[in-house]
Every structure is written in structure tokens, then in C-alpha cells.
Image: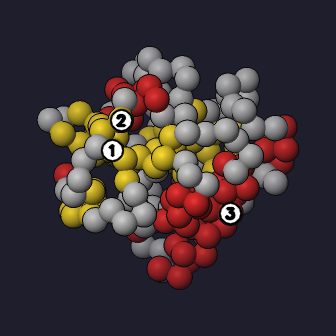
């Protein structure tokens, strides 16, 4: 799945990322959010830069993950943040200003695959799972391409399920009682 995601032409990644970004932005601007976790894309992941810029314009704080001592932390970024290549080749800010994960309202998480019941397959480190497993407040939304849907992987008790996934064709909601989205989310609008 990672190879397929990474083998897409850059123009297709941009096109699909723009569609995903429009779906995200159409929902996020209707919500009362203070802190949203995003990520810096790599290996053909959906690009979130337009979403991040929109969040900045809406005065919503943006955090991104950094890994330190086998643990994921979230650090604030600003529109003028400078980045360097960090752990696992992922860009991270040069200035680290960490935020308690329990303060994060919504996480936009990259993934390798997602299942039809909302399980997330990441890169295998379990970082998101460990941070959010016992956190029932934060909404976890997977960000993916349609072709990443797969029911060919297993999850275990330590895997944090997704509340929703957004792809280039819209939203899939798995935990609607937790989400503050209206019912139109389910129809991809």
C-alpha cells in the first residue's frame, strides 16, 4: 500500500490532496476548535498544507507530531515555522513548543490503510495508538486516498480506532456519536 501511495505521480497527489483538503476545510470551519493536529506529508501521503493555512487563517492552533525517546509529542507550529528533517525522515519544526495531547480537539492522522470499520494501519510504531488510546475526547480522523481502504489487516486491543476517515471522495464516519459533524458528513458532502 505504501508503494502504491508513493508511486502516484505528483500531479495526482496534488489533485487528490486538494479534494481532501476541500472536504476537511468544509467541515472544520463549522466546528468550534482550538487545537488541531496535522502532519508533514511524506512518501506520497495526502498533503495538508492548504488545510494548515486555512487553520492559521481561522486562528486555530496547529500542532504536528515529533518523536522523541520512542514517544510521540505534539508541538505548535506557526505560519513562519522553519523545519528540518527529523526522526524517520519527517520534517519537524526547529522550535519545539509541546502541547498536552489531551488538549487537542481533532487529529488529522496519516495512515497506510484503513478498514471499513475504522481501524487504522500506520507504519507499525503504534505512536498514535499509545498517545490517544485512553483519550476519549480527541477526535481521530484518518487522512487517506480511496485505494487505501482494506479489510486485509488485523487490529488488536491496543489499536486506537478512527472516528472518521476523509479521502478524495468524502467522509466515512465510524463513531458518529462522538463527532460533532452533522448528518450530511455520511453522504460525502
Mark found first going from the N terminus, 2 or 3: 3
- Give the percent coordinates (x, y) of residue 54: 59, 61
- Give the percent coordinates (x, y) of residue 69: 14, 35
Label 2 close to label 1 by CB (< 8 Å): yes
How many residues crowd around disc 2 within 10 Å: few (fewer than 14), some, or many (20 or more)?
some
* Distance Cα–Cα, label 3 vs label 1: 25 Å
* Distance Cα–Cα, label 2 vs label 3: 27 Å
- Give the percent coordinates (x, y) of residue 22: 68, 63
At mark 2, the secondary structure is: strand
Q: Can the viewer see residue 100? A: yes
Figure coloring:
secondary structure
Q: Residue at x 67, y 38 (%)?
A: 32
* Residue 99: mark in rendering: 2
For the N terminus, the image quarter is: bottom left
For the C terminus, the image quarter is: bottom right
Picture quadrant of residue 82: bottom left
* Distance Cα–Cα, label 2 vs label 1: 6 Å
Left or right: 115 with respect to 8?
A: right
* Residue 22: mark in rendering: 3
Mark found first going from the N terminus, 2 or 1: 1
Choose between 35 and 16: the one closer to the eye. Answer: 35
Q: Residue at x 27, y 64 (%)?
A: 83
Q: Nearer the viewer, mark 2 or mark 3?
A: 2
Query: What residue sits right under mark 1 in the picture?
Result: 75
How many residues crowd around disc 3 within 10 Å: few (fewer than 14), some, or many (20 or more)?
some
Q: Residue furthest left?
A: 69
At mark 3, the secondary structure is: helix
Mark found first going from the N terminus, 3 or 1: 3
Left or right: 131 with respect to 155?
A: left
At mark 1, the secondary structure is: strand
Amino acid at each position: 500500500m505504501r508503494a502504491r501511495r508513493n508511486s502516484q505521480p505528483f500531479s495526482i497527489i496534488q489533485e487528490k490532496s486538494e479534494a481532501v483538503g476541500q472536504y476537511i476545510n468544509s467541515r472544520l470551519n463549522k466546528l468550534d476548535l482550538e487545537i488541531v493536529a496535522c502532519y508533514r506529508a511524506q512518501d506520497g501521503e495526502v498533503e495538508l498544507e492548504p488545510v494548515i493555512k486555512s487553520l492559521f487563517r481561522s486562528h486555530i492552533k496547529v500542532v504536528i507530531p515529533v518523536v522523541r525517546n520512542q514517544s510521540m509529542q505534539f508541538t505548535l507550529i506557526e505560519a513562519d515555522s522553519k523545519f528540518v528533517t527529523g526522526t524517520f525522515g519527517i520534517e519537524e519544526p526547529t522550535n519545539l513548543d509541546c502541547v498536552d495531547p489531551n488538549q487537542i480537539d481533532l487529529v488529522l492522522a496519516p495512515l497506510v490503510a484503513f478498514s471499513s470499520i475504522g481501524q487504522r494501519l500506520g507504519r507499525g510504531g503504534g505512536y498514535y495508538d499509545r498517545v490517544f488510546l485512553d483519550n476519549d475526547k480527541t477526535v481521530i480522523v484518518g487522512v487517506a486516498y480511496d485505494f487505501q481502504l482494506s479489510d486485509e489487516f488485523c487490529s488488536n486491543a491496543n489499536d486506537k480506532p478512527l472516528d472518521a476517515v476523509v479521502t478524495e471522495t468524502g467522509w466515512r464516519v465510524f463513531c458518529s456519536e462522538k463527532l460533532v459533524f452533522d448528518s450530511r458528513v455520511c453522504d460525502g458532502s
